[in-house]
């Protein structure tokens, strides 16, 4: 008998997208599914829409709950799973109709605890595929635990996203997502991957990650700093279990901190008294020795750290000049992004 796959879909204010998401799951070539649709107190018609789906397909479970955020909705969904495998799909995304069939085959072939597929960044009129880390024609990659954890920290081939990965359910059932934070996957992924012996990457893009048009500059709030909090929590975890990855971890924290310092500067009305910028400066000052060592092999980040420690505005000037040089094609744009018309 086919193994059952539980699919958890947290739903909030996605009336425009929910049909495409759910239909892509119902149309899977792999049929033994348990589809858990969690209405997180959505104020639009999402609750009514998924109730209609419930009437049409007995593989669907519907949970209605008060709004508690993405993490809470996922946690409630995980409490209901009965499948041997679990997949998370965000409700404004969609998946290829053969995604689960392909991932189950790979999981069983390689006895994998987790299988990750490649994905498209999906815009309204086109798709983008990141060829820097994936080649659609490449064979599956098998990672052991030390390699997996390194790749997770680097966040290039293995992303922190919970979605787009097929997990053995036993690995994730007792590790909840942290509630009340943004970028909840950063707080969660390393705890899961710590348990993984065999991780397989397939390079065929089977997941469509929808990109909304909202600008991060326009929608930025200090809550976005949760990602730095998550990275620091992960750093503490690495200190206990993966000491050899601390240099890479410092590098990621630094790069992320510099990005958010810049965003806070642009949105300085949302940082009264510059308290959040000062917090970033304080961390970089207090960990200067460790950060300098971590960027020895990264010339650009080393320049940025050097300039920031003299004065943060110098780093922002450096970024502005680099952007202008790219615009006038004196230095090249990053390579590897392939646009695909829909």
Image (spheres, rainbow, N blue to C red):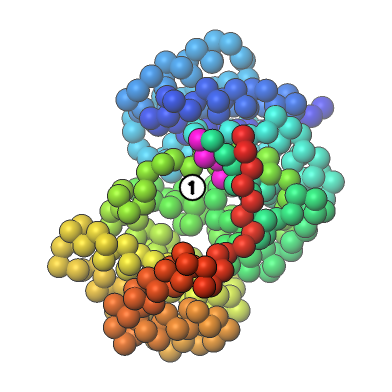
Residue in the picture at 15% in, 67% down: 273
- For the residue pair 256 and 237, the one nearer the viewer reads as 256
Q: Quadrant of the N terminus?
A: top right
State which quadrant residue 156 falls in.
bottom right
- x then y, percent, for residue 174: 54, 47
Dominant secondary structure (helix, strand or loop) of the stretch shown in magenta: strand
Image height of 179 relative to 51, above or below: below
Residue in the picture at 44% in, 51% down: 184
Magenta region includes residue 123 = yes
Image height of 294 relative to 9, above or below: below
- x then y, percent, for residue 105: 81, 40
Label 1: state its secondary structure.
loop
- Horizontally, residue 313 falls left or right of residue 341, namely left
- For the residue pair 72 and 290, the one nearer the viewer reads as 290
State which quadrant residue 269 falls in.
bottom left
- x then y, percent, for residue 246: 54, 77
- x then y, percent, for residue 321: 40, 74
Q: In the rendered image, is residue 102 in sight?
A: yes
- Horizontally, residue 274 falls left or right of residue 262, namely left
Q: Quadrant of the C terminus?
A: top right
Image height of 120 relative to 6, above or below: below
Magenta range = 120-124
State which quadrant residue 65 falls in.
top left
């Amino acid at each position: 008998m086919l193994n059952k796959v539980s699919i958890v879909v947290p739903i909030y204010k996605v009336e425009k997208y929910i049909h495409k998401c759910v239909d892509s799951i119902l149309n899977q070539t792999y049929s033994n599914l348990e589809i858990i649709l969690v209405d997180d107190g959505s104020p639009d018609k999402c609750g009514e829409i998924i109730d209609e789906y419930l009437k049409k397909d007995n593989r669907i479970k519907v949970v209605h709950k008060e709004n508690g955020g993405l993490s809470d909705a996922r946690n409630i969904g995980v409490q209901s799973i009965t499948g041997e495998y679990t997949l998370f799909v965000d409700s404004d995304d969609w998946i290829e109709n053969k995604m689960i069939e392909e991932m189950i085959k790979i999981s069983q072939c390689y006895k994998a605890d987790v299988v990750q597929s490649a994905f498209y960044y999906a815009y309204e009129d086109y798709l983008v595929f990141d060829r820097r880390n994936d080649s659609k024609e490449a064979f599956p990659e098998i990672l052991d635990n030390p390699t997996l954890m390194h790749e997770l920290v680097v966040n290039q081939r293995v992303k922190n996203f919970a979605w787009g990965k097929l997990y053995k359910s036993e690995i994730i059932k007792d590790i909840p997502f942290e509630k009340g934070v943004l970028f909840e996957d950063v707080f969660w992924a390393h705890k899961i991957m710590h348990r993984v012996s065999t991780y397989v990457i397939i390079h065929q893009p089977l997941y469509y990650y929808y990109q909304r048009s909202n600008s991060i500059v326009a929608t930025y709030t200090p809550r976005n700093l949760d990602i730095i909090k998550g990275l620091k929590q992960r750093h503490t975890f690495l200190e206990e279990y993966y000491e050899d990855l601390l240099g890479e971890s410092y590098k990621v924290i630094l790069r992320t901190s510099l990005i958010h310092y810049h965003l806070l500067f642009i949105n300085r009305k949302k940082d009264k008294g510059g308290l959040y910028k000062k917090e970033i400066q304080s961390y970089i000052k207090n960990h200067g020795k460790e950060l300098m060592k971590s960027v020895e092999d990264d010339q650009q980040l080393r320049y940025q750290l050097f300039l920031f420690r003299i004065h943060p505005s110098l780093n922002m000037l450096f970024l502005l000049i680099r952007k202008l040089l790219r615009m006038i094609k004196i230095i090249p744009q990053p390579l590897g992004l392939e646009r695909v018309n829909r």
